[in-house]
Image (tube, coloured by chain):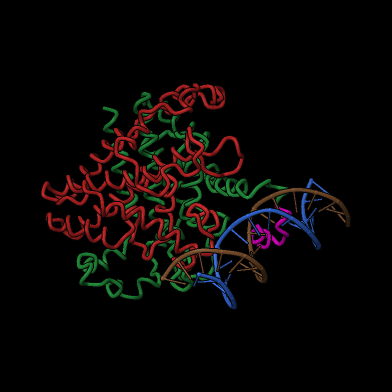
Chain colours: A green, B red, C brown, D blue
Amino acid sequence: MRAVGNRLGVEAMSLYKHFSTRDELLDAVVELVVTELDNDRLVRSGADDGWRDYLSRLAHGVRRYALAHPHAFPLVATRPAEAPWVNPPLRSLSWIENMLRTLADEGFDPDQLLFAYRSFNSFLLGYLLMETGALTLRDPQSGDGSFSAQGTSDPVPGGLDPGRTDAEAESTDAAATPAELLDPQDDIDENRYPVIHSLARELAEDHYGDEFDSALIDLLDRVAAQLD
Amino acid sequence: MRAVGNRLGVEAMSLYKHFSTRDELLDAVVELVVTELDNDRLVRSGADDGWRDYLSRLAHGVRRYALAHPHAFPLVATRPAEAPWVNPPLRSLSWIENMLRTLADEGFDPDQLLFAYRSFNSFLLGYLLMETGALTLRDPQSGDGSFSAQGTSDPVPGGLDPGRTDAEAESTDAAATPAELLDPQDDIDENRYPVIHSLARELAEDHYGDEFDSALIDLLDRVAAQLD
DNA sequence: ACCTGAACACCGTTCAAGT
DNA sequence: ACCTGAACACCGTTCAAGT
């Protein structure tokens, strides 16, 4: 609370005029991040091009906010929800309703709606937690579990403002990070982990963007197959 | 630290003989949970029945430890890793090596190995975080974000010991939870969320076990399709 | 080798008081 | 309506001392 207050140029106690507890503030952070979808023109535009286009735009919108806030995404992913069927990363009743209604209008029956809802959520949750996790590695300098971004000393890169453009987010894939300047093979014990050692370079250099797109296509195919 | 010490009948400071920092202790918790795979006879038995059988047993082993420790799984899922390509829930070099070697022995080439490794991890991560999240709902009594298990006042059900049997873990799906005793439809505003309202019962009653099995089959089919 | 008690800096939170 | 300063209970951690 004191750190947040400091960031805002205010004493910690002032925050209690706006949030009655630390958990309430964390919930507000999660809501703020997820609500970026509401202002995402690429997501909000209608579903006139069919459910595949709609789900694809929704998925990319979620990915945009996840990559814009890689340190907040674990919060989005793990904060307890109000009901067992309210699943991250689509955490809000209004977006769940939005998705289910759009698909219902496209002719999905109840079983197909539930299948699409759950497989869509668990796909995004797993893939984006994996991808953002790769951006928030353990700091090799300080031995504790604090976060650090690759190649910057800013403790909260991106911060809370959705300032990153699509191109900036995508550039994470292509831009050379400090880790790539070293040979990742050198870090792996060839005797204990021969297969990892031999694959070290391929494991280190990865193009999350392309993989996301093709995994999303496969997911949409699975949903389509469910429609008979 | 004081709470952990209390649970062990010891002062908090005694823990510092075994872990030099709180983060180190949390890492040890994660390692303890993941290491249950090492003692899981259903997972360790050889890969003589092919890679599909191996990956299926591995996936079910991960699900067993996740369901045995639903409160620790978010830690497994989100603690920063040592390298970007060390992904939860398979977090350890030895299990990554184990998986890659087994698949390599089955004839996977490097691209196929990487595809299998990443799609397998992100599938398990997303699905199991969703499933364990449904077990650790927000406590409606205390307004804060603390955890509570459905239907028990034990703050850490299951605790750290891998005491739950397979049948007990599965029974989560079938057993009637308090939430099911109420009509979930009553909680949803019919005017604001008509589609959710109409699907409330189906959303609330779910059989994670069956869904996991069929989603896993689809994943293995995706991997198989990659083999040409 | 493992545990303890007192102590330190720090954190979330309360409250009475300021503008 | 919003902020502040001092204060409280609590937390992670250190250290010198115990067995």
Query: In this view of the protein, which residue sits in the foreground, B130 or D14?
Result: D14
Residue pictured at 45% horizontal, 58% vertical = B26
Residue pictured at 17% horizontal, 50% vertical = B45
Our reading of the magenta stretch's main secondary structure is helix
| In the displayed structure image, the side of residue A140 where residue B3 appears, left or right | right
Tell me if residue B29 can be seen: yes
Residue pictured at 49% horizontal, 34% vertical = A83
In the picture shown, does residue B33 fall above or below A206?
above
Quadrant assignment for the N terminus of chain A: bottom right
| In the displayed structure image, the side of residue A153 where residue B102 appears, left or right | left
Q: Position of residue B109 (x, y in %)?
A: 16, 58
In the picture shown, does residue A172 fall above or below A73?
below
Question: Which of the 4 image quarters holds residue B222?
Answer: top left
Q: Is residue A4 magenta?
A: yes
Residue pictured at 26% horizontal, 37% vertical = B213
Q: Is residue B115 magenta?
A: no
Q: Position of residue B88 (x, y in %)?
A: 35, 54
Tell me where the magenta segment starts and ends, as one range: A1-15
Q: Position of residue B183 (x, y in %)?
A: 49, 21
Tell me if residue A146 can be seen: no
In the picture shown, does residue B69 fall above or below C7?
above
Query: In this view of the protein, which residue sits in the foreground, A72 or A226?
Result: A72
Q: Where is residue A123 in the image (x, y as percent from the top left)?
A: 36, 44
Quadrant assignment for the C terminus of chain A: top left
Query: In this view of the protein, which residue sits in the foreground, B167 or A70?
Result: B167
Question: Which of the 4 image quarters holds residue D5?
Answer: bottom right
